[in-house]
Amino acid sequence: MINHTMRKLRGELSQRDLAKELGIPQSTYAMIETNQRFPRRDLQMKLANYFDVTVDELFFNQIDHESRSKTNSA
């Protein structure tokens, strides 16, 4: 499942280039964007600051939305 917020905010910038700007490995960024890994608090803040959004907007609103969608479709 893709973090659609991160994907949208990344725009045309490649994962590799964005990861380089953040000073993290591209594989780490990719795993976060595809929800295979949840970042530590310091990296959550770095990503939120980079995208100029809150940590909640970047990570938790999508989780809440997906949880509600699963509950409503059951």
Image (spheres, rainbow, N blue to C red):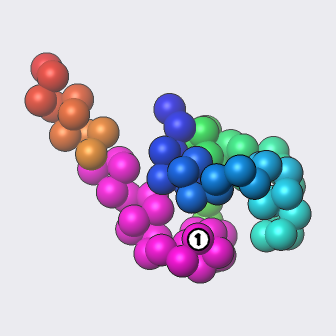
| Viewer-side residue, 9 vs 20 | 9
Q: Residue at 47%, 62% (x, y): give it.
A: 58
Is the magenta region chiefly helix, strand or loop?
helix
Question: Going 75% across and 54% down the picture, which residue do you hit?
Answer: 13
Q: Is residue 71 left or right of residue 3?
A: left
**Magenta-highlighted residues:** 41-64
Q: Would residue 9 be seen by someone viewing this image from the given angle?
A: yes
32 shown above or below 41: above
- 66 vs 29, left or right, is left
Residue 27 percent location from the top left of the image: 81, 45
**Residue 74 falls left or right of residue 5:** left
Q: Position of residue 40 (x, y in %)?
A: 61, 66
Question: Visible in this render: residue 45?
Answer: no
Q: Residue furthest top?
A: 74
Q: Residues within 10 Å of mark 1 (few under 14, many from 20)?
A: some
Q: Position of residue 63 (x, y in %)?
A: 35, 48
Q: Residue at x 64, y 53 (%)?
A: 11
Locate residue 30: give its quadrant: top right
- Find residue 56 and report its image quarter: bottom left
Q: Is residue 26 left or right of residue 45?
A: right
Q: Is residue 66 magenta?
A: no
Going 59% across and 79% down the picture, which residue do you hit? 49
Q: Which is nearer the eye, 17 or 61?
A: 17
Q: Amino acid at mark 1?
A: Phe
Vertical placement of residue 20 versus 66, above or below? below
Residue at image mark 1: 51
